[in-house]
Image (cartoon, rainbow, N blue to C red):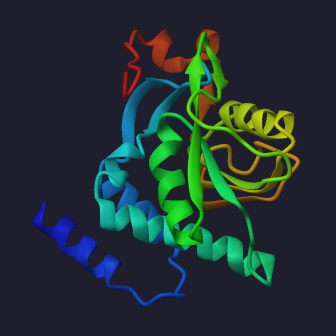
Amino acid sequence: MHTYIGHLRRMVGRKEGVLMEQKEILDILKNSGALLEGHFELRSGLHSDRYFQCANVLRYPRLAARLCDELVEIIKKSAGDGIKVDAVISPAMGGILVGHEVARALDVKHIFAEKQDGKLVMRRFQMTKGESFVIAEDVITRGGRVQETIDIVEAAGGKVAAIAVLVDRSGGKAKFNYPTYSLLKMEPVAYEPVKCPLCAKGFKFVHPGS
């Protein structure tokens, strides 16, 4: 624990504009408990021996800020002249903390969509036609929640400027019609339930976070 806290303090003290290396990001996720190993059923319904529980790294507010600052820096560098948007929107619940920190880094407001009857909807906020958004999420596998959020923005007459995620566990295979940026790309092995070797061995799966 003391080793990790010391690393956390060094991370927070890094110079602005200096991009982190992928190994450094992966180490942070492992040390914070955000990268778990076992037998998991993912939100997509697939099974895997690895699971990203980004809430475990986001529980450290200053580190959450540093990671999301890094993500915004990646977007700005790619956009050339920077990125100008009206707001950040994220799907609840996993994307809320990421969306809030990305919005802080961009100095814009943050709103979020929530589940109702199994579908993402806007319950607390109103969107104005023509508003431009960054969609922020913690982890994507197939990208279903991000696509639902895209649909919500488009249905309201809004514009999607970019998609920002902490971890793309599809290895870049999840595709959207808008520029997508991530801090880390990984593709842990994922199985259809009927083909899962962990199930075949009788290992019980868990639903992390549930």
Q: Position of residue 17 (x, y in %)?
A: 54, 88
Residue 72, above or below 157:
below
Residue 22 visible in the displayed image:
no
User: In percent of the image, x 38 and y 14: which residue is there?
Assistant: 203
> Is residue 51 toward the left or the right of residue 128 in the image?
left
- The front one of 32 and 74 is 74
Q: In which quadrant is the C terminus drawn?
A: top left
Query: So how many labels did they put on this image?
Result: 0
Q: Looking at the picture, does residue 162 appear above or below residue 199? A: below
At x 48%, y 87%, the residue is 16
Quarter of the image where one finds residue 120? top right
Q: Camera-side residue: 88 or 86? A: 86
| Occupied quadrant, residue 62 | bottom left
Residue 201, position as x, y percentages in the image: 43, 13
Quadrant housing the N terminus:
bottom left
Residue beneath the point at 41% across and 17% down: 205
Farthest residue in the left direction? 2
- Horizontal and vertical percent position of residue 147: 76, 35
Q: Is residue 80 left or right of residue 117?
A: right
Q: Is residue 77 left or right of residue 33?
A: right
Query: From this viewpoint, is residue 150 visible?
Result: yes
Residue 76 point in image, percent of width and height: 70, 77
Give the image quarter of residue 46: top right
Residue drawn where x is 64% and y is 29% of the image: 122
